[in-house]
Image (tube, helix red, strand yellow):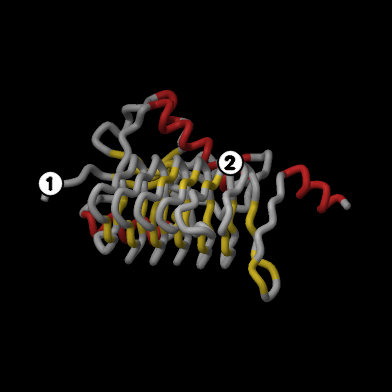
């Protein structure tokens, strides 16, 4: 097996142990993480802060023998204006940094992930244990799937999509950019042969059951003892909170 380049994480997360497990299995040395919000030497889950991500703008070749990986994740619920308070904003900001500087990026695909024929994924992607990806699935860049997530044939996802533990996208589902599917959530067309589309920035909360297409920026929620779909845009959310 060809030796993999060492990895530098751009940003930090409390789930570093999941990422570093893949690195160990793939034979990738972890150099540390870059994060403007932590002092040098700060350690999270055994990974040390080695500097600020901002330094890459001044010297993008500082870690020329390494590849990079997007360090922070998000929970599907963050939309704060202050990037320091929002995992979503931090993730988007660091994707922009990596793309602008054209940094080389690792994929961290767990060896126990099953990927069937014809399936492809972009760069900066991650899979956990026992993820099941069927035939002709297409992922964009910076997509993540946690343990036991499953994707039926011909599923398509744009960039920066996140599928949590045991999330399921049935065959033929099309997801846009920045979509979040929570744990144990199911996305499956309600009628045979119908195309189900999730627009950009759609959030499917954990245990939700989605059977119809969702407009960009809407949210499917699980509430009480029954599963139902509720579309909320950000203005509605603010109105409900203030009201």
Residue 52 image position (x, y, % from top left):
47, 37
Separation (CA) of disc 2 from disc 1: 35 Å
- Say which residue label 2 marks: 89
Do the residues bearing badges 2 and 1 touch, measured as CB atoms within 8 Å?
Answer: no
Residue indicated by mark 1: 2
Kindly indicate the quadrant of the structure image that contains residue 79.
top right
Residue 69 horizontal/vertical position (percent): 37, 43
Q: Is residue 167 left or right of residue 209?
A: left
Which label's residue is closer to the chain start, 2 or 1?
A: 1
Query: Tag 1's secondary structure?
Result: loop
Residue at screen point 46% across, 36% down: 95
Residue 199 in the figure: left or right of residue 3: right
Report crowding for label 1: few under 14, some 14 to 19, many 20 or more residues within 10 A (C-alpha): few
| 98 and 185: which is toward the camera | 185
Does residue 13 appear to the left or right of 59 in the view shown? right
Which residue does the image show at 47% across and 43% down from the upper left? 160
In terms of depth relative to the viewer, which is nearer, 154 or 165?
A: 154
Against 120, residue 131 (above or below) is below
Q: Is residue 163 visible?
A: yes
Say which residue appears at 47% left-offset and 62% top-offset: 167
Front one among 236 and 97: 236
Question: What SS does tag 2 mark?
Answer: helix
């Amino acid at each position: 097996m060809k030796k993999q380049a060492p990895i530098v994480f751009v940003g930090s997360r409390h789930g570093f142990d999941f990422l570093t497990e893949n690195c160990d299995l793939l034979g990738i040395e972890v150099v540390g993480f870059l994060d403007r919000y932590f002092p040098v030497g700060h350690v999270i889950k055994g990974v040390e802060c080695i500097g600020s991500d901002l330094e890459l703008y001044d010297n993008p070749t500082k870690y020329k023998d390494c590849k990079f990986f997007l360090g922070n994740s998000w929970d599907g619920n963050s939309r704060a204006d202050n990037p320091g308070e929002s995992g979503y904003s931090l993730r988007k900001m660091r994707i922009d940094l990596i793309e602008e500087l054209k940094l080389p990026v690792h994929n961290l695909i767990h060896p126990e992930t099953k990927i069937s024929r014809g399936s492809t994924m972009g760069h900066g992607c991650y899979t956990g244990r026992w993820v099941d990806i069927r035939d002709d699935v297409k992922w964009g860049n910076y997509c993540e799937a946690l343990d036991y997530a499953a994707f039926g044939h011909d599923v398509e996802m744009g960039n920066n999509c996140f599928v949590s533990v045991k999330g399921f996208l049935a065959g033929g589902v099309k997801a846009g950019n920045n979509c979040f599917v929570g744990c144990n959530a199911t996305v499956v067309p309600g009628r045979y042969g119908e195309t189900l589309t999730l627009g950009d920035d759609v959030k499917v909360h954990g245990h939700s059951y989605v059977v119809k297409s969702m407009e960009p920026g809407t949210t499917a929620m699980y509430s009480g003892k029954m599963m139902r779909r509720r579309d909320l845009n950000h203005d509605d959310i603010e109105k409900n909170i203030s009201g």
